[in-house]
Amino acid sequence: MTETTGSARSATSAREEILRRVRRALADVPRGERSEVDRDYLAVHGARSAGENIDLLAENLAEYRAHVHRSGEAEIAVTVARLLAERGSRSAAVPGGLPEDWLTRVPPEVTLIHDSPDLTAQRLDAVHSVISGCALAIAETGTIVLDGGPGQGRRLLTLVPDHHICVVRVPEQIVGSVPQAFAVGALVPTRPQTWIAGPSATSDIELDRVEGVHGPRILDVVLLGAA
Amino acid sequence: MKDVYLGMPSFPEAARTATKDERLRANLTRATHTIRDKRAKAVTEIEDWAELVEAGKAIKDHTLRHLDEYLLQLEAKVTEAGGQVHWARDAAEANRIVAGLVKAADGGGDQIREVVKVKSMATQEIGLNEALAAEGVAAYETDLAELIVQLGDDLPSHILVPAIHRNRTEIRDIFRANMARYGRPAPEGLTDAPADLAEAARLHLREKFLRAKVAVSGANFMIAETGTLVVLESEGNGRMCLTLPETLISVVGIEKVIPSFRDLEVFLQLLPRSSTAERMNPYTTMWTGTAAGDGPRTFHLVLLDNGRTDTLADTVGRQALRCIRCSACLNVCPVYERAGGHAYGSAYPGPIGAILSPQLRGTASEIDASLPYASSLCGACFEACPVAIDIPEVLVHLRARVADAEPGHRAERAAMQAATYAMTHPAAYRAAEAAAIKARRLLPPDRKLPLGPAKAWTETRDLPELPKQTFRQWWKENHR
Ligand code: SF4
């Protein structure tokens, strides 16, 4: 099609022209200028022990209306089963790589749906819950980061169901602050990431905060190892 | 194709109409004050706010001064990660590119008649929805506030809370009357409780998310080093749009690039606290090109100029390109509070709109020539800005530009209209303005800000030379 050739040519020239405009606009910038950014901000706000970080994470998550639970390794299966029962869940999605021993007490009336390529968003729309791990959690901001690693899976798994049970291993998966989340090298920038701070919310109607518009309306966070 | 804001009256005229709307004013006042108070708390909670502001400003300035290099790096990384990069000189070109991509998204079948959208100021700026409509493609806004605006056939009035001028009863009526026209109708007996309204929106939009083949978004940040795009949001509609459809098209201004992944540690602290007064917004999504088995299979990035390079060429005005669209400057602005967002005649209301629109579009039109006068130069916006944009400085600079362009003619008229507005607008406005000015008079003689914990703040916050009164005075002093 001649049309394609024409638009391809104009596409190239758009790129060249914008770059030319940028360079012309920056005529005042000395060639080879290299400025350093002063990073005088703090790496972390205040000194806290590992235990205090766990408490702060729990507090901040709760302030943004997540439900926070603590569980030892031995009780994790019971905790997961209890949370599914409390929410009246009948089905739960399970990402690949989720530790099987978290699921050993799930009652038979809850159907576990292991992730597979044919688990589409349409099918997930009928699934009540999802159980996942995480990549790390940030105490100061009450934030959980998912990066699609083992036990977290594809992004839609933790998006479409209305109830998300998210397990954070503490203290090892907790960092104190946002800069620490970037410093530890735990996050691989090129993996799809979802940062979660409390359940979905809006303040668009007269600035009243309402939980749950499109993401999971119930976020249960289990701090594993903090019994 | 309809240009959204074409034929807008100039600022003083539009503001006069808006200030007469009691309900709009009441909603705006309540909203801006609520956000303002909450924000102050979120900002004072961390003691290094001033250093974060300084770093945010420095990162943005550095990027802008080497913009060509970072754009090329970004392009290479996005392409490497499986994305396709397009360049658009202006709105028309961007709209043409997006329309073409939507039509080609089903392999040339030309069957796609709708796209879902996540709130984006860039697409608002270029009038993308109208352009797509002209091509027979419906663009559905999925932010609750944008949905309200779209169903109510309205223009947004605030960057962050576009439906800030609507109260809950109006929203219920809009949902009842118009949801059925676009898809799933509002539930029977819908009340005006915010939770019920949110539930109605959830059901209405879930249907659209599940069947959408194409999504259109903007982005808060683009990382040159990795090719990663970042979207911050609250409701989860962003995650839906960025995750479920097969094709994702992101339209992003060229000034949104930042050098490195690590730079996010600054902006992920500045932006949520400054915009929604939260320690962190509920959801942030980051993606790099396409990922096997996770999310869209096709990703297009449309890099938009549309006046940004003109803005960049002005060594005083280019600081406006640092803006991270937090809307803090709106919430502290006495003029915005009185006039409302619609009066600014562009996608960018409030103080940032007053300096950005005349630079992006030039000052040829009545509204753009009058925007630099839509301020009393009280300086509250500068104090609130998380990337230290000296809005009063740019306003004064742009006033000079307007005056130089057409001495004694259109510029004078714009200023006279502004002055008329100032003299006729409600006393309540003067009170707000006076309060802001009074606050500044309390400043010590060295004109540094007296903010306790934020000592380095004053490094960036040297106040510009400001008139002691309003722009009426300023005009008198500068024009015989
Ligand atoms: S100018 Fe500053 S305060 Fe206003 S929206 Fe932009 S970043 Fe926020």
Image (cartoon, grey):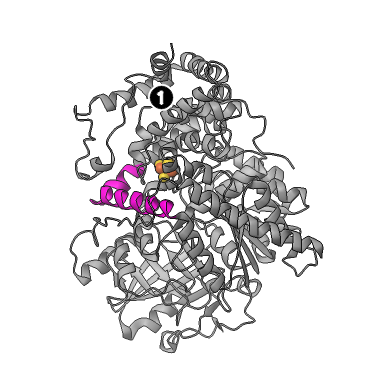
**Local crowd size for mark 1, using a 10 Å CA cut-off: few (<14), some (14–19), many (≥20):** many
Badge 1 amino acid? Ser
Q: From the top left corner, tell me how far across and down residue A67 is, in percent.
A: 39, 65
Give me the residue at 38% from left, 24% from top: B432
Which sits in the foreground, A178 or B348?
A: B348
Residue occupying the point 52% across, 31% down: B340
B5 to A134, vertically: above or below: above
How far across and how far down the image is residue B326, in percent?
43, 46
Which of the 4 image quarters holds residue B38? top left
Left or right of A104 in this view: A2: right
Quadrant containing the C terminus of chain B in the rendered view:
top left
**Residue with the most extreme top position:** B480
Q: Position of residue A23 (x, y in %)?
A: 49, 51
Front residue of this view, candidates B279 and B85:
B85
The verdict on residue B86 being magenta is: no
x 61%, y 29%: residue: B365
Q: What stretch is highlighted in magenta?
A: B38-66
Out of B209 and A114, give the one closest to the viewer: B209
In the image: residue B136, left or right of residue B20 = right
Q: Which chain carries label 1?
A: B
Q: In this view, does B45 lie above or below B427?
A: below
Which residue matches tag 1?
A: B376
Q: Nearer the viewer, residue A1 or B55?
A: A1
Where, quadrant-wise, is the N terminus of chain B in this rendering? top right
Q: Quadrant of ligand 1?
A: top left
> Can you see residue B45?
no
**SS class, disc 1:** loop
